[in-house]
Amino acid sequence: AQSVAQPEDQVNVAEGNPLTVKCTYSVSGNPYLFWYVQYPNRGLQFLLKYITGDNLVKGSYGFEAEFNKSQTSFHLKKPSALVSDSALYFCAVRDADKIIFGKGTRLHILP
Amino acid sequence: NAGVTQTPKFQVLKTGQSMTLQCAQDMNHEYMSWYRQDPGMGLRLIHYSVGAGITDQGEVPNGYNVSRSTTEDFPLRLLSAAPSQTSVYFCASSRQSSYNEQFFGPGTRLTVL
């Protein structure tokens, strides 16, 4: 079965600094990977996805993700963090007709 | 468009009671799914549907039933509620298949006493 792992429960970043939220995957075949964000007391919102093509995927709110096949990683990045980026971030992978989520990483942006 | 709607927003049940969580979408999406979110566990897939009349089990289907009689609606039934089913439940939908971005509802917070 396909799976993703998010090795950090929480990440703290100072406002204005670059941020990275890590995700590694385990798949057989071509991976289809996603990032979602959850703001407090809200449902999840789609940020970006990787299906094929360029290893750098651009998404919503200035986020991007880098697909690295040799390291089986799909890290989420942003060049300059905003306080409003503070939220819970989920990596996900497609497994046949199912979307399987990681456990989430809470991102705190410190003013 | 209202997007994905879920009712109720909050619910408290006693052990052994049954109930149905409602989910509806007005985007004509073929694919719909139910997840539960628990602290430290992330989102876990309960059931999903690739179209009207077709449902399948996810990661944690035990204790839950679903049906998909129309494209718009995908209700989740708790047959006999247990405290372990205390959670926040999210419904989601996407166009055509799981390749596409999912749109999530606002969630239902369920407490089973």
Image: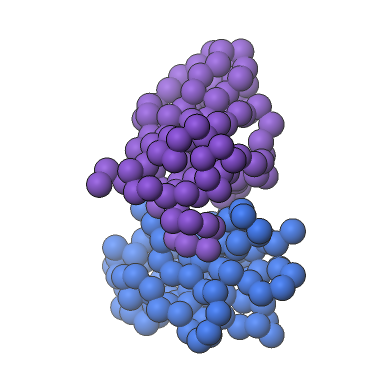
Quadrant for residue A81, please give it.
bottom left
Q: Position of residue B44 (x, y in %)?
A: 60, 46
Answer left or right for A111 relative to B6: left
* Above or below, comparing residue A63 to residue B32 in the picture: below
Q: Position of residue A41 (x, y in %)?
A: 36, 43
Looking at the picture, tell me which residue is in the foreground, A97 or B96.
B96
* Above or below, comparing residue B43 to residue B81 in the picture: below
Where is the C terminus of chain A found, in terms of image quarters?
A: bottom left
* Above or below, comparing residue A10 to residue B83 in the picture: below
How many callouts does the rendering have? 0
Answer left or right for A84 relative to A3: left
Residue in the image at 31% along x and 70% along y: A61
Looking at the picture, tell me which residue is in the foreground, B53 or A21.
B53
Where is the N terminus of chain A found, in terms of image quarters?
A: bottom right
Residue B113 seen in the figure: no
Colour used to depict chain A in the structure image: blue
Q: How does the figure colour the protein chain or chains?
A: by chain
Looking at the picture, tell me which residue is in the foreground, A61 or B39.
A61
* Above or below, comparing residue B67 to residue B94 in the picture: above
Q: Position of residue A99 (x, y in %)?
A: 58, 55
Residue B98 seen in the figure: yes
Chain letter for the purple colouring in the rendering: B
Residue in the image at 74% along x and 70% along y: A28
Q: Position of residue B41 (x, y in %)?
A: 60, 47
Residue in the image at 49% along x and 23% along y: B20
Residue in the image at 66% along x and 58% along y: A96
